[in-house]
Image: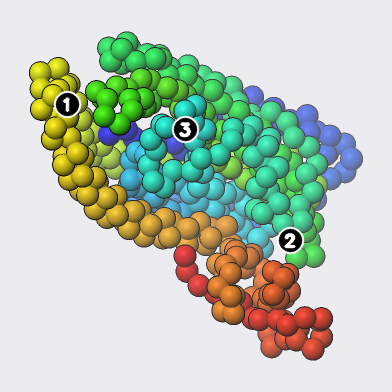
């Protein structure tokens, strides 16, 4: 059983104050005093408190963070089967009472780019073309921050740390690949920092959106034999991209001055050693059981192929029908469980991203809309009217027939 753990502090930035030049520039133009006053009013640099993130899978504290005492906090840990392996992801958001300052880590999104279409993936695994961090950021930022203007895109400070992490993973897995006579896995990464500006209500806001990607190219066993032939497989490389975004925001003109203190909040995320031990034991138990089962099936198949090929071919059709029926049942059970987990995760993600899932009761069409709007309508062409005005009805005021959208869960 494979398991994926994700960077909890997003690979620390260098200790040097790399943004010092920008803070000095703000002082030279007379903005430092305003920034310091605003930061103090928001609670930055004052008293702090510790908050907890609980893993509901094990019902125990997984992480803690240290945040300003007057700030608000929401966090979630998602542990359990992923599309292809066990995984544990953390997501959180921290914000000041006036909403102007905040730090957020968004859930990981993963997809596969396969070399051979015959490569088997989990039923819930996504297949997509390879995307750079810049491509991915340009694709999702309009959804995450509607109306945002991208001011600049530069290499994120976490880039060097991700490269070092890739080297360590390659070194650890290379020896295991040699032992199993597999191709060596390859790891690469991409980290870009988007600086964006947008309006939060009537107030101008500025934000760093650090878009990180970790790409693993792993050997996957692909069946290349045709029906009726002896089982034959070969290794092909499968590319998996895992992308996540970390955000730090402040009022426009004050982001550079506040960046270091926002970074301190983000870097305060600490893992509970007891939870880490529990996760490790759980993964080992599941992994060892699957390895034993996999080797037993493989050895039985090879022995039958070598010694009883003719008899196997005679019984093959009945055996395959039986295995297919069992597989269909297992896949159906797995799909139901995964669908329930996926829908629950989608609801949590919508909550963290301040989104709501809606359905058009007239045609069943579904859409996700920012919680900024609470009274939403759609016409037959799929066009939408979004508003906060309760009781507003576009019928008779806007051309077309409009149906009010109803909020639902995934």
Q: Position of residue 392 (x, y in %)?
A: 72, 86
Q: Could you tell me how far apart the alpha carbons at marks 3 and 2 are, in whole angstroms?
A: 45 Å
Q: Is residue 353 above or below residue 248?
A: below
Q: Secondary structure at mark 2?
A: strand
Residue at image coords 65%, 60%? 99
Q: Is residue 307 visible?
A: yes
Q: Could you tell me how far apart the alpha carbons at marks 3 and 1 are, in whole angstroms?
A: 24 Å
Task: Choose the circle earlier in sequence order: 3 or 2.
Answer: 3
Q: How is the image coloured?
A: rainbow
- Along the line of sight, the residue nearer the viewer: 44 or 84: 84
Task: Choose the circle earlier in sequence order: 3 or 1.
Answer: 3
Q: Could you tell me how far apart the alpha carbons at marks 2 and 1 are, in whole angstroms?
A: 62 Å
Residue 117: mark in rendering = 3
Task: Write down the quadrant of residue 368 in the picture.
Answer: bottom right
272 left or right of 106? left
Residue at image coords 66%, 54%? 143
Q: Position of residue 339 (x, y in %)?
A: 38, 57
Q: Is residue 97 above or below residue 149?
A: below
**Camera-nearest label, 3 or 2:** 3
Residue 301: mark in rendering = 1
Q: Is residue 61 visible?
A: no
- Along the line of sight, the residue nearer the viewer: 6 or 21: 6
Q: Position of residue 317 (x, y in %)?
A: 19, 39
Q: Position of residue 275 (x, y in %)?
A: 29, 42
Check if mark 3's residue and mark 1's residue have beta carbons within 8 Å. Answer: no
Residue at image coords 43%, 60%? 343
Residue 241: mark in rendering = none
Q: Secondary structure at mark 3?
A: loop
* Quadrant of the drawing holding the N terminus: top left
- Along the line of sight, the residue nearer the viewer: 185 or 214: 185
- Residue placed under numbered mark 2 in the picture: 200
Task: Write down the quadrant of residue 288 in the picture.
Answer: top left
């Amino acid at each position: 059983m494979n398991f994926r753990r994700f960077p909890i502090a997003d690979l620390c930035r260098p200790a040097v104050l790399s943004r010092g030049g920008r803070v000095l520039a703000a002082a030279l133009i007379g903005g430092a005093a305003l920034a310091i006053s605003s930061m103090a009013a928001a609670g930055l640099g004052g008293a702090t408190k510790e908050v907890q993130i609980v893993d509901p899978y094990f019902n125990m504290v997984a992480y803690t963070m240290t945040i300003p005492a007057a700030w608000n906090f929401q966090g979630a840990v998602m542990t359990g089967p992923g599309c292809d392996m066990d995984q544990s992801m953390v997501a959180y958001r921290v914000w000041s009472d006036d909403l102007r300052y905040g730090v957020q880590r968004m859930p990981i999104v993963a997809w596969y780019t396969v070399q051979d279409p015959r490569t088997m993936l989990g039923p819930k695994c996504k297949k997509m073309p390879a995307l750079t961090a810049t491509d991915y950021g340009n694709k999702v930022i309009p959804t995450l921050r509607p109306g945002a203007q991208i001011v600049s895109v530069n290499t994120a400070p976490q880039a060097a740390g991700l490269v070092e992490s890739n080297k360590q993973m390659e070194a650890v897995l290379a020896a295991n690949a040699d032992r199993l006579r597999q191709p060596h896995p390859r790891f690469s990464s991409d980290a870009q920092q988007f600086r964006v500006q947008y309006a939060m209500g009537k107030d101008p806001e500025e934000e760093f959106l650090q878009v990180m990607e970790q790409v693993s190219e792993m050997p996957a066993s692909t069946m290349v034999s045709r029906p009726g032939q002896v089982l034959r497989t070969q290794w092909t490389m499968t590319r998996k991209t895992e992308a996540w975004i970390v955000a730090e925001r402040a009022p426009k003109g004050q982001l550079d001055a506040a960046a270091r203190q926002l970074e301190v909040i983000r870097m305060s995320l600490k893992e509970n050693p007891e939870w880490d031990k529990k996760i490790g034991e759980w993964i080992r138990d599941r992994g060892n059981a699957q390895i034993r089962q996999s080797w037993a099936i493989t050895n039985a198949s090879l022995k039958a192929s070598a010694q009883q090929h003719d008899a196997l071919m005679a019984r093959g059709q009945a055996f395959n029908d039986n295995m297919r029926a069992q597989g269909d049942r297992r896949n159906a059970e797995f799909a139901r469980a995964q669908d329930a987990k996926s829908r629950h995760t989608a609801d949590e993600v919508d909550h963290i991203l301040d989104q709501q899932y809606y359905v058009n009761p007239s045609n069943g069409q579904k859409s996700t809309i920012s919680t900024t709007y609470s009274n939403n309508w759609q016409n037959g062409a799929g066009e939408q009217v979004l508003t906060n005005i309760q009781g507003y009805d576009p019928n008779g005021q806007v051309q077309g027939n409009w149906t009010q959208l109803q909020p639902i869960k995934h």
